[in-house]
Amino acid sequence: MGRWGIGTGYAELRRRRAERQRLAAEQGWEFREESPELAERWRDAVLSGGHDTPPRARFAATGTLDGHQVTVFDLVRGRGGDGIRTVHLVELPRPLPLVVVSRNMLGPDRLLPLLRRQILQKPGHHLYESGDEAYDTVHLVETTDPDVAGRLLTPAVREFADDHLWLEWRVDDRWLCYVGYSGPSARTEQPLAVLRSLTRLVDLTDPALWGRPRPAHTRRPAPAAATPSTSAATPTGPAAMHRGDPAHTGVHPEAAAPPGFLPWSTRLPERPTSSPVVCAGTLYQNAGQHCYALDALTGEPRWRHDAQDRLTHTPAVAGDTVYVVGEDGLLYALAAADGTERWSTRVGASAAPTVADGVVYTVTMSMFTLRHTRPSTLIATDARTGRRRWEQHLPDGSCSAAAVADGLVHVTGVKGQLGAYRVKDGKRVWYDDNAERYLALCSPSVADGTVYLGTGAGLVHAFDAATGRQRWGVEVGFSAIDDSPAITDDLLLVGDFRTGVHALNRSDGMRRWHLAGPHGASAVTVAGADAWVVGLARNRSLLRLDLATGAAHWRRALDATGGSPAYADGVVYVTTAKGTVLALDALTGRRPGRRQRRRLS
């Protein structure tokens, strides 16, 4: 039995101790088995829950993160660890008279009256509310200085809070504190991700509170084992990104597979979080908290970058730099040669980055309901330096990447709205309020002065890119369209959520052909007279289609559900939910032999 005893409570203590020791070792932080000082200071951060035993602060890890002093520990009440909450702390630049700041998703009819009684009965304390009470979103600030509270709730902080399901965070003297979940839900928490979010919240706060200017972006130090690149990022040169190019056309230059090319497959150790992108002979794939770079012709690994938090959406490549975004809201610029970090800046949890003419465009993704939409922000970042050029508030909110063409940035709203903004300064040029009752995830596609957009209701619209005038709109499959349409000279190719692939006339939206699929289809990738798509039963087949008829030249089974395929230099690439990256000759579809299959560790 040993010092820990037996039972589920002791097992949970052993698990937390091991995880905290591992975190401290990875980050180079100090680890303490127990801290009476922390227990005394934060004993009231969590309700007692009926325990008479004084709380104990266990497994404390302390160090520096993103330029801030941070601490994470477990506050344990009761015997055997049956009452445990993880406490996350970030040191503030200087003390504040703020006592508590909280956001809740509980019913306002029950919680708000209680909070009003507790707060307003105390002399000098004030209650601030924002958000939509119908959606159970309320912000509360209790302080003896209403000016401080008003400045803390800046628009940036309000937007940040709206995008994250904080149950409660507190300010006490010089520390911002967040208390984690209790029970089984605690296992889903990632202490490092929570701490990064708290440091971001401090950076978003009104700089006047700290008495000094705050930098435009926070540079993260590279891992100790890596050597940062000293060369400047070059935004010119070959480029590849979400749906192929900044306009998201899904069309690639046609080519034959290189002489001697052998199909290959590589199994990544983590579940992929994006579609692959291929540029200048290298395939880039996000999986978990890593960005992997593989040789596009052989599948051999070239490098792996650890972002410390889960990376989301397809990377963007321009010249010798790779751009990726993480769930912690950081946009990273990595050297394409070796994956070292050149710079990072906070842009918020965003859709896939788009790079055009030396600028990286990101759109913060908002939470969404049919009754209430939270705003997003369109941000233009200098691709070489990471400095912000401009930002534009998007009141409708967005869940999709920006498309860039002919001096305009086009962004879709969460209910199918569409807006166009100038690349020069972000000023809105036109806006179409084509609101629906369905969530719209589709990024727009642009070609020859026309913007094409699929919606959550299964509609496809065509708009004049310069004026916003609608040219046509059709219903194609009565199912959500989440991926950008591919655009050829005369066709629009759309994969939807339930009915398969639809080929429409670009001029009027009339249907040419339909490839049925019981579980919908991925985005369509085009080169020359052919198209590649993942579809059919459970989206476990990769197909090469004839653009004129929709007939399948070949079909290859996948080991799991596949994402949208990528094409480069006569080779088609697809990643499956099991982490398999597959490269086939785009024309023949020949499978890899045993010697061309490998697994990364």
Image (cartoon, grey):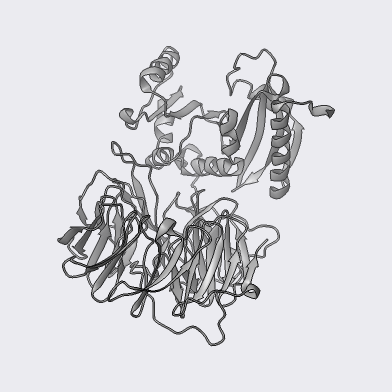
* Foreground pick, 134 / 285: 285
Residue 151 position in % (x across, y down): 41, 35
The quarter holding residue 24 reads top right
In this picture, residue 139 sits left or right of residue 279: left
Image quarter where the N terminus lies is top right
Q: Quick check: can you spot residue 273? A: yes
Residue at 84 percent of width and 29 percent of height:
2
97 relative to 293, above or below: above
150 relative to 401, above or below: above
36 relative to 289, above or below: above
Residue at 60 percent of width and 67 percent of height:
266
Residue 242 position in % (x across, y down): 41, 64
Residue 77 position in % (x across, y down): 67, 21
Residue 104 position in % (x across, y down): 43, 28
The quarter holding residue 292 reads bottom right
In this picture, residue 312 sits left or right of residue 77: left
195 relative to 390, above or below: above
